[in-house]
């Protein structure tokens, strides 16, 4: 069965007792971190009784507008996936996005399981291993570019409204360097096969110490893999790079819009925390969330956003209320949507003859 093979491919080799123990310890540390943040740290920042009062004070129209924007935000990642996988329909992209996000947000090692879910669902619709691999890599690369670009955009916005500081300029300079470096590597890989070979050898040297620490075999050279990736990437990007770029920015900015609207509806005014400062906090937290300390950044994102927005001038209780509502709409909402999406996919594949799925 494709489902069984794809899941096995996504999970890799079976884990030994030491690997399971390490995973268990990591999961325990992750849960402990979440508990400390929600039970100890956030209650010291804000009175949860007042936080709840601010949440209840939102009108029905405000709640409806937040839900409408949140459902749009949920859909926008389809704008990233469809250009990376020719033949993928928006309905299929929606099912994949929600099911994989639900896994990533709720399960230990959720990011890896989410990729396995993505692989399995794509395979059931007839997409090949190279097509799926390219889609996952391209969507990941463009999302990384967006995360690196957002702090630069935020700094420009802060400069326009007169809020740029030396610390923010320094952080943005680091962001620009990282963005230029990553785009430079990607461009060098696309420019020629020789460039792809050089990028592959650079990655091999970079990963060698990591492989030795993890006691992993070196495997096939990255130069050959990067050459193959280059050839496939050029074919997809030639016709869809603009759609992919626009879709990625729309996806990230839609997420920012949910945060901004939530702050305003809860009572944090433009005078207290301006839209540019909210963008800067959002951009910073998007970078922080790239490190998988907890599933979906649970706890870490809440604490980082709260610290950044209160430092910018927001009222403690109102900021915590807005952050919790924002996370309910962007972290919790995709979980039931993902469960429904997975069931719809299972019902869909159950109607396909077994000979077609194998």
Image (spheres, grey):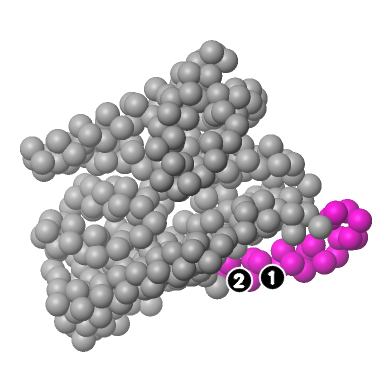
Q: Nearer the viewer, residue 259 or 289?
A: 289
- What residue did someone put label 1 on? 343
Residue 232's place in the image compared with 330, above or below, is: above
Q: Tell which of 92 and 30 is nearer to you.
A: 30
Q: Quadrant of residue 203?
A: top left
Q: Which mark is residue 115?
A: none
Whether 111 is among the magenta residues is: no
- Left or right: 312, with 35 as reference point: left
Residue at (89%, 60%) from the top-left corner?
354
Residue most extreme to the left = 166
Please provide percent x and percent y for residue 8: 68, 56
Q: Is residue 272 visible?
A: no
Residue extent of the magenta highlight: 337-358
Separation (CA) of disc 1 from disc 2: 6 Å
Helix, strand or loop: magenta stretch: helix
Where does the image place residue 35, in percent across and percent down from the top left? Answer: 30, 77
Quick check: 185 above or below 263? above
Whole-percent x, y for residue 271 in the image = 12, 57
Looking at the image, do the residues carrying marks 1 and 2 touch, with CB atoms under 8 Å apart? Answer: yes
Viewport quadrant of the C terminus: bottom right
Q: Nearer the viewer, residue 273 or 224?
A: 224
Residue behind mark 2: 339
Residue at image point 50% right, 25% down: 200
Image coordinates for residue 257, horizontal then vertical, percent = 35, 54
Q: Check disc 2 and report its element: helix, strand or loop.
A: helix
The quadrant in which residue 149 appears is top left
Q: 57 above or below 151? A: below
Label 2 crowd (10 A; few <14 / some 14-19 / many >=20): some
Which element type, helix, strand or loop, lies under badge 1? helix
Q: Nearer the viewer, residue 61 or 133?
A: 133
Within-10-Å neighbours for mark 1: few <14, some 14–19, many 20+: some
């Amino acid at each position: 069965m494709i489902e069984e093979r794809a899941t096995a491919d996504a999970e890799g080799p079976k884990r030994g007792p030491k690997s399971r123990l390490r995973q268990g310890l990591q999961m325990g540390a992750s849960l402990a971190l979440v508990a400390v943040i929600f039970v100890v740290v956030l209650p010291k920042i804000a009175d949860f009784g007042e936080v709840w009062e601010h949440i209840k004070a939102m009108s029905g129209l405000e709640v409806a507008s937040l839900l409408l924007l949140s459902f749009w935000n949920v859909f926008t990642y389809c704008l990233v996936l469809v250009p990376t996988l020719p033949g993928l329909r928006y309905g299929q992209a929606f099912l994949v996005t929600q099911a994989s996000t639900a896994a990533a947000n709720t399960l230990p090692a959720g990011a890896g399981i989410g990729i396995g879910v993505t692989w399995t669902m794509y395979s059931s619709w007839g997409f090949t291993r190279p097509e799926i691999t390219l889609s996952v890599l391209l969507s990941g690369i463009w999302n990384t570019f967006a995360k690196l670009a957002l702090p630069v955009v935020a700094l420009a916005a802060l400069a326009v409204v007169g809020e740029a500081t030396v610390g923010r300029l320094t952080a943005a300079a680091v962001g620009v360097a990282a963005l230029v470096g990553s785009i430079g590597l990607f461009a060098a890989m696309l420019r020629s096969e020789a460039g792809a070979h050089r990028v592959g050898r650079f990655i091999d040297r970079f990963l060698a110490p990591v492989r030795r620490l993890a006691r992993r075999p070196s495997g096939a050279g990255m130069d050959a893999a990067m050459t193959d990736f280059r050839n496939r990437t050029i074919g997809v990007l030639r016709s869809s790079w603009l759609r992919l770029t626009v879709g990625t920015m729309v996806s990230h900015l839609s997420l920012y819009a949910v945060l901004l609207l939530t702050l305003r509806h809860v009572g944090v005014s433009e005078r207290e925390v301006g839209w540019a400062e909210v963008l800067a906090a959002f951009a910073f937290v998007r970078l922080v969330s790239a490190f998988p300390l907890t599933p979906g950044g649970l706890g870490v994102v809440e604490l980082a956003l709260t610290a950044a927005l209160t430092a910018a001038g927001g009222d403690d209780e109102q900021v915590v209320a807005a952050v919790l509502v924002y996370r309910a709409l962007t972290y919790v909402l995709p979980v039931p949507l993902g469960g429904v999406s997975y069931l719809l996919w299972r019902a869909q594949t159950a109607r396909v003859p077994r000979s077609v799925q194998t």
